[in-house]
Amino acid sequence: MTHNIYTATRIRGLSVRDIRFPTSLESDGSDAIHPDPDYSCTYVILYTDTDFKGHGISFTIGRGNELVVEAVKSLSHLVVGKDLKDIYEDFAGTWRALTSESQLRWVGPEKGVIHLAVAAIVNALWDLWARTEHKPLWKLLVDMEPEKLVSTIDFRYIGDVLTKEEAVTMLKEMQHGREAREERMLTRGYPAYTTAAGWLGYSQEKIERLLKQFMAQGWRHFKIKVGQDIEDDKRRCKIVRDIIGQDMTLMVDANQKWDVDQAISWMKELAPYKPLWIEEPTSPDDVLGHAKIAEALKPLGIGVASGEMCQNRVIFKQMLQAGALNYCQIDACRVGGVNEVLAIYLMAKKFNVPVCPHAGGVGLCEMVQHLQIWDYISVSGTTKDRIIEYVDHLIEHFKTPRKINHCHYLAPKVPGYSVEMWEKSLLDYEFPYGAKWNALFDEGRYKDPRKGPPPWVEHRVKGDIIHR
């Protein structure tokens, strides 16, 4: 580690911006519960008293993003003014401070808006750490001594399932062959599936056109959204099966639409189309409901996948204990950032459940590639039954976007967590005063929330805390 940088470097400020993209205009991202998402993110930049900056995001789908922005501002005092050395030498303590602020935790704790805000800050801290080490995040994680990596995790509430000592042992057992696995990620990459042809609001013509386009590119794993109408779901599943054939993989995603018994009966009707899994069949908090569904669908060869909206590591712990998941789906910012995601990977390893990350959105593909590549090299050692979601929306807004080669994510080589966006994109899509939003409001395509001129012209500075 470059201790001289840590010793001399302090976080002097934090900016946070409300960035939104009008994806609902084309039904991109639409599903049974969210018919009109505007892919958005709370975008954080940590400024230091050197040239290093840390970029972090938390993903939302439009209205409510402003709540996460305000929560970030409320939490910012917990990192601004701190030396990097103090943060990274006790990262678990820093994470606990962010999640356990004595008054703010009341509006969590470790869930909802407040936890999304924690994720944005924590992801920026990891991006900053990787940049100071001149490594992409996955490489920073891979190169850490097991004891050091485990020290970044807060084991409170999960020690009955996974201890620090067990986690260290897991990592040490996987060190053999690490170099070969790393080389594989750099040259071949990690297998991916696409959801980009399966949004619920897409017409039949668009689904067919996109499926054929993706198949021509070599894609062999496809996911579609279901859950609004059983006859329409059967029609759409048949369309997909007729085009991709019987040998390719189909997954379906209900986005929490159903009650437990409804999920079971609905999936029995979709079983002839041979879906690999049903994703988010019911409430993301219903551990026993997921377990009942998993047991009922097992004879049909349909697995249960969930996790993109699991609140925290405790829900994941219970899901794994109950046998409720056949596929564990982490999200890079639904839980409290990298630290908590690492704990979930290690618990999944102990329960022998494959992790298949949720991606898409704004920057999720960029982030989860780092996490899944680390898992392959340092934790699981295999891609069997594991695959990363991929969509191509909004890729043009990132300075170092994910790279796909033959339907595989290639391991990033640029230092950081890959979420830094172009300044022009930030200026154009900052809500509600960015140039793109101004044009949409003026055209009457969205209800205009603007009230007078922008409240800012440049960053406002209050002490060492910078807010947009």
Image: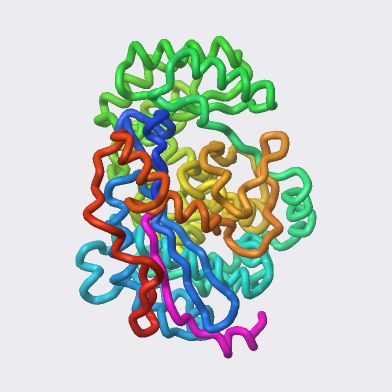
Up the image or down, 131 lies above or below 233; here it is: below
Q: Quadrant of the C terminus?
A: bottom left
Picture quadrant where residue 148 is located = bottom right
x and y percentages locating residue 187 in the rendered image: 78, 47
**Is 408 colored magenta in this rendering?**
no
Horizontally, is 278 left or right of 104 in the view? right
Front residue of 125 and 449: 449
Residue 250: give x, y in percent of width and height.
Answer: 53, 24
* Residue 154: % across, % down: 42, 70
Asked which quadrant contains residue 137, the reply is bottom right
- Nearest the viewer among 394 and 283 is 394
Q: Is residue 6 magenta?
A: yes
Question: Does the rendering let one see residue 321?
Answer: no
For image coordinates 43% across by 55% down, the residue present is 333
Task: Please determine whether, in this image, residue 62 is positioned above or below residue 27.
Answer: below
Q: Residue at x 76, y 48 (%)?
A: 184
In this view, the residue in front, 269 or 252, is: 252
Which span is picked out in magenta?
1-18
Q: Residue at x 56, y 32 (%)?
A: 194
Residue 147 at x, y = what percent?
A: 59, 74
Q: Residue at x 34, y 32 (%)?
A: 281
- In the picture, the quarter occupied by the N terminus is bottom right
Residue 214 against residue 407 in the figure, above or below:
above
Horizontal relation, residue 37 to residue 299: left or right:
left
Colour scheme employed for the rendering of this structure: rainbow
Please indicate, yes or no, whether residue 50 appears anywhere in the rendered image.
yes
Relative to 153, 218 lies left or right: right
